[in-house]
Amino acid sequence: MATSEQFLTYVLEQLSDVEGVRTRPMMGEYLLYLRDRLAGGICDNRLMIKPVSAARALLPDAPLEPPYAGAKPMLVADCLEDRALLARLFQEIYDELPPPKPKKRRKPA
């Protein structure tokens, strides 16, 4: 089941206080970036966060589930109504998110 436009809009509205949040569509779902670092995704109308230690501390009861078959599990963030908690979550996980990998340069043909 693909994420609905309404859910995507709602999540982005709830995260509007967090600077540097953007999404990238991927096969009917969305990758979620925080200042160019992959923070999680929006999959099947669920906000999913990489299970770094800061996220686990702030969301201790969040279940770990794979966003799709064969994927690494992520935390399902069921705190969408709490904008302050979401902002704090994204501020605290940033330093634990791996930086983007350098892009490989193509060799001229």
Image (cartoon, helix red, strand yellow):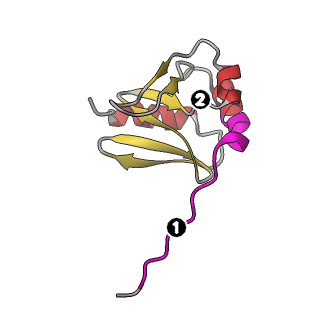
Residue 104 located left or right of residue 54? left
Tag 1 residue: 103
Q: Determine crowd level at label 2: few under 14, some 14-19, many 20+ residues with C-alpha closer than 10 A.
A: many
Identify the residue shown where x is 69% and y is 40%.
96
User: How many numbered badges does the structure rendering display?
Assistant: 2
Label 2: element kind: loop
Residue 37 location, x and y as percent?
59, 49
Q: Nearer the viewer, residue 37 or 85?
A: 37
Against 42, residue 79 (above or below) is above
Against 2, residue 37 (above or below) is below
Residue 36 location, x and y as percent?
59, 54
Tag 2 residue: 51
Identified by mark 1, the residue type is Lys
Q: Which of disc 2 and disc 1 is earlier in sequence?
A: 2
Residue 32 location, x and y as percent?
50, 42
Label 1 to label 2: alpha-carbon separation: 25 Å
Identified by mark 2, the residue type is Pro
Against 89, residue 33 (above or below) is below
Q: Place residue 31 in its image quadrant.
A: top left
Q: Looking at the rendering, in which quadrant would you find the N terminus?
A: top left
- What span is in magenta? 90-107
Residue 62 located left or right of residue 92? left
Q: Determine crowd level at label 1: few under 14, some 14-19, many 20+ residues with C-alpha closer than 10 A.
A: few
Q: Nearer the viewer, residue 70 or 83?
A: 70
Q: Place residue 4 in its image quadrant.
A: top left
Q: Is residue 98 magenta?
A: yes
Against 16, residue 54 (above or below) is above
> Chief secondary structure of the magenta span?
loop
Q: Is residue 12 magenta?
A: no
Q: Looking at the rendering, in which quadrant would you find the C terminus?
A: bottom left
